[in-house]
Amino acid sequence: MNPTPIRSDCIESIDLDLFRSMRPIASRKVDVLDERSCASREDTIQKGEIVTFYEHETIKLDMPHDDALVIALEVEGAVFSKILIDTGSAVDIILQKTLRSLEQPIPMIRQETTPLASFEGKSVRSLGIILLTTRSYDLEMKTEFTVVDHPMPFDAIVGHPWLHQMRAVPSVYHQCMKFLSPTGEKTLLGSQKQARACYMSEFRKMP
C-alpha cells in the first residue's frame, strides 16, 4: 500500500480502448478536473469508454485497510461469495469442492495437469481444465478454470484470463471491480468481511 494519502480531488482513469489494441494499460491521474482538462479529454476519448474510481467510493469502507479483493460471482447458475481477485495469477482456479456444490450437471474436466504454487509456496498439481459459465449483471461468458483439490479459503480465484475477458479493472484500494457491459458501466463490490474471514481461516493453519 502506498503510504502517500490519496487526495479527494484526485481520480484515476483507465482507458479501456487500450484493451482492444493489446497495448499496456495506461493510467492517468488528474489533480484538478477543471473545464479545460475535461474538454481536452473528451476530444480523444468517447463517453462510456472510461472506467473511473472516485475517492468518495471508499466512504463506507473500514479504512485504512490492506484487505484482498473478494467478490461474489455467479458460476454455472450458483452464486459464490468467496471469489478472490488475483491480478498476479496467470490462470483462473476453482476448487473441486466448489464444483461438487453445483446442483446442475457440470462439463467434463479435461485431463491436463498444470503445476501451480500454493499460498504456502508448495507445488500443487491440478486435476485438469473445465469450461464454466460465469455471469455478472448482464455479461455472461465461458471461462476455462484450472481445477485443484487443495485446501484454500476461497471458492475460486480469478486472474488475468477472466479479468481480460471481462475487460475488468479491479481496485483493491476501492474494494471493487468495474467493467463495461452492453448496458453501461457496472461495479462489483468486494466484501471486507469475507476477505478478513478468509485471511483468518488461512492464518489459523500457519504453524
Image (cartoon, helix red, strand yellow):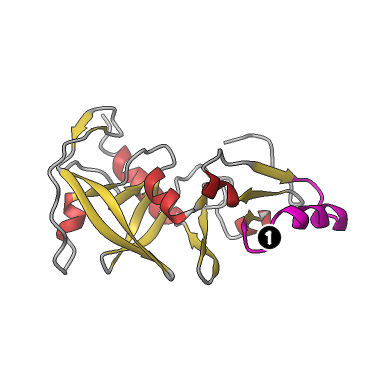
From the viewer's perspective, is 40 left or right of 114?
right
Does 181 appear above or below 148?
below
Residue 6 visible? The answer is: no
Q: Quadrant of the N terminus?
A: top right
Callout 1 environment at 10 Å: few (<14), some (14 to 19), or many (20+)?
few
Residue 93 to residue 47: above or below: above
Quadrant holding the C terminus: top left
Which residue is at 38% across, 61% downward?
72
Q: What secondary structure is marked by label 1? A: loop
Q: Position of residue 156 (x, y in %)?
A: 29, 50
Residue 176: percent from left, percent from top: 51, 55
The residue wearing badge 1 is 46
Residue 49 shown in magenta: yes
Whole-percent x and y of residue 13? 66, 50
The residue located at (41%, 53%) in the rendering is 165
Magenta stretch in the rendered image = 30-50
Residue at 28% across / 32% down in the picture? 206
Q: Is residue 15 magenta?
A: no
